Amino acid sequence: MKREITLNINRELETLTIDDADTLLEVLSERLKLWSVRESCGVGVCGSCTVLVDGQPVSSCLLLATRAAGEITTLEGLQTGSSLHEIQQAFVEERALQCAYCTPGFVLTVKAFLEQNRNPSDQEIREYLAGNLCRCAGYADIIRAVRSAQAKINSR
Amino acid sequence: MAIRSFDLLQPRSLPEAVAMLARHGDDARALGGGTTLVILMKQRALYYPYLVDLQTIPGLAEINAESDGIRIGALVTHRRLECSPVIRASFPALADAFGQIGNVRIRQTASVGGNLAHADYRLDPPPALLVLGAEVSLFGANGARTVPLGQFFRGLYETVLEPAELLIDIKVPFMPENSRAVYLRYNTLSANDWPCLGVAAFLTKANGRCRELRVALGGLASTPVLVGGLDFIKDQTLDFAVIERLLDTVDQQIAPFADLRGSEWYKRRMARLFVKKAVEQLSAAW
């Protein structure tokens, strides 16, 4: 069935007509051209399509768009003006990306994580990020970037 | 791949949801968190022209403490249960079992009722809920009924749920004094994968000796197993001979089948190992 919905995306309201079968990923990536939201595995395992709903990470590939109530944040919503978010800066400085396909998902997951836990242990970081896959195998750099982002955010 | 078009029906009450399911019969399915159903429809392994959205029914996503236990609404997410202070305080083993499922995004989306109703054999929560003596409330055209979780699972992806009947909540009774429970998950593939097996154990002690021991295992066969015949544990201490007898009893009651995560032989060995670990952790905790 087609229906009109209003989504709150990156602090802006978007009203659009969608099909009940549309996933949030399809709406964000194909309709709204938010290209940081990327499909990879399509079954919630890899984390490439991660977005935040009310600050919590979800896989947009298996969330029906009609059910996406709340404030949706994609990577595009992190930036203010032309300056990168601290987590993005940390990823650049620590070279925690290579092909960067997985990076938006990681950055958003780290954002949710550091908001819940300002002083995590290494084990807690690994457990929380275990659901995001990086096939360039930059995990050590990514964990360093989390520490760097944590320092930047905590010293705001 | 895009999902074939369907109609999402949005009931406002349980009777309305049940009526929708009854009206459309095999053409409709209840939608909880959607982590399984949406994937299966996306992969075109399943198709339903109608999905009945349970998220639009008020009151199904609550965690309420009652006089004798805690009632968990079917639409509570795994993540909420995992992080809930009241669950962590009363049933840390249950928070652990839910906290080890999939990844944080799946746990943020999946519902506890959907998890049980799906009845996959590799689920983490059933062993933990079985040793805690949980029961589930079901709601259908003839009203509500309560079923102990031990009688809920009938086979691979099969439960006692009738057509157009819904699992609406899970009731977990408070543990008696001097009781502890633990859930251990054993992964043979990645951390995101289903477990090779999951073991839950529950121990009540009195005067330094065992009063009651319950053990349940998941991931081995079509349905989770709550091990019977453990009365011999009463008034014993968990010494080598008692633990060996326990492990033999467990071994007699499981019938593992081989899958990607282990052969039958391997799963039997691991069942012994993890039951032993679980029981030792419980007895060391005192």
Image: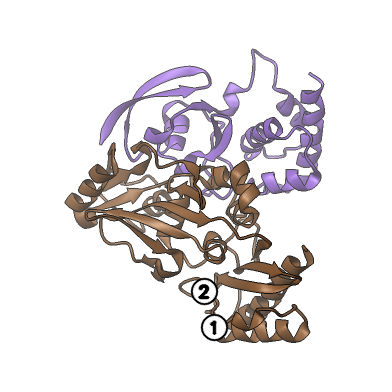
Chain designation of label 1: B
Q: Secondary structure at mark 2?
A: strand
Q: Which chain is brown?
A: B
Looking at the rendered structure, the number of numbered marks drawn on it comes to 2
Which residue is pictured at 20% across the width and 55% down the height? B25
Image spot of residue A10 (x, y percent)? 53, 21
Q: CA distance from mark 1 to mark 2?
A: 8 Å
To which residue does mark 1 refer? B253
**Colour option used:** by chain
Which residue lies most toward the front here?
Answer: B207
When the figure is inspected, residue B264 is found, relative to residue A26, above or below; the finding is below
Q: Is residue A6 left or right of residue B250?
A: left
User: Is B137 or B176 nearer to us in this picture?
Assistant: B176
Q: Residues within 10 Å of mark 1 (few under 14, many from 20)?
A: few
User: Is A30 or B238 nearer to us in this picture?
Assistant: B238
Query: Which kind of residue does numbered mark 2 sit on?
Result: Val
To which residue does mark 2 refer? B225
Image spot of residue B125 (x, y percent)? 54, 59
Q: Colour of chain A?
A: purple
Which residue is pictured at 74% across the width and 43% down the height? A125
Image spot of residue A147 (x, y percent)? 81, 35
Which residue lies most toward the top here?
Answer: A81
When the figure is inspected, residue A40 is found, relative to residue A155, above or below; the finding is below
